[in-house]
Amino acid sequence: MLALRQPPLDPRCAVALRALCGAAREIGEDARSDLRRWYWCNVFLERYSSAVESKSRKDYVDMRRRWDGDQAEPGLFAEARARIGSPGFSVRHSASHASTIYCGVFCLLAIRGARDWRRGEHIQLQQLEDHHIFPKAYLKRHNIDARIDVNSIVNRTLISDETNGKIKDKAPADYLAQGGIFPKGPSALLLEPHYIGTDALAQMGAAHEGASDAAAVKYSAFRVAREQSILRDIREVCGVPEPAESSPRQEEAIGDDGDDDEDADTN
């Protein structure tokens, strides 16, 4: 069964969530759609990390007014449009289960129907490990070892512990070619639900053992491509349009360490 160490949204917002759920059931599908949007906006804004009581009260009042016919947009939705809809919005800094963004992306993987690469079974049926797509040991061999770079959510996905064990510290290009990991090949059917589209897959396929500077270039390009896929899904569940500026956010220099302390596995 899929079991995250921590739910995406801070449990302290449970009072507001219960109250809003009760009201939404009375009103109908439009309200339930708003409630789902409210949930995901809070997750990806990490909004309930402080001032929980005041935010809970404001959210309840704003949402009830909306459902009672007030045309004013709830403040949360306006904030999400301004921040999540910004071309500069990024999730690369999330590198720990303490982050609701980190846990929220894992939940979206399950909703998208992500499957284990070797078994082809839904991740909810697996004993899961959060896998480094570019393995930690591989990156370390190529002089990439800053925690924020290695453990970023854009380098993590959920696969079975057995598949993770077979990958170990292999270069992405090497494990993509192994039938013991991808019995039917690394198809889009398996990889796209993991936010690994054509551009990200191309960088993985080119990431062999070799010069460290080449590995850093491939890894940077992979992170940019995969983050764009993740952000499209985040904006969709939050009801936020894509920014008019379509060019992806520039990759920060690899090697700038962060404060997150995630975690001990090497794959």
Image: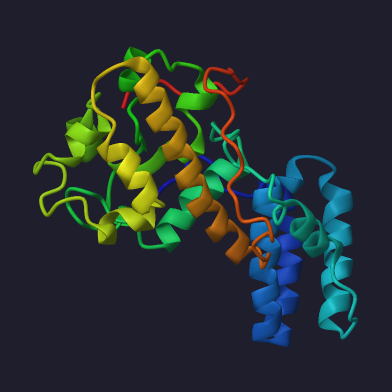
> 151 or 161: which is nearer to us?
151
Q: Quadrant of residue 239?
A: bottom right
Say whether residue 1 is visible. Answer: no
> In the visual, does 114 lie left or right of 250?
left
Query: Quick one: quadrant of the C terminus?
Result: top left
Residue 90, image quadrant: top right
- The picture places residue 168, in percent across and down from the top left corner, at 23, 27
In the foreground, 205 or 17: 205
Image side of residue 20 versus residue 249, left or right: right
| Depth check, front residue: 245 or 116 | 245
| Residue at the image position 15 percent from the left and 42 percent from the top | 181
The x and y percentages for residue 84 are 70, 53
What is the number of callouts on the image? 0
Where is residue 102, by image quadrant? top right
159 relative position to 83: left or right = left
Q: Residue at x 66, y 77 (%)?
A: 32
Instruction: Say if 211 sits above or below 151 in the image.
Output: above
Residue 10 percent across, percent down from the top left? 67, 46
Residue for point 54% across, 21% down = 261
Q: Quick check: 185 left or right of 137?
A: left
The residue closer to the viewer here, 5 or 221, is 221
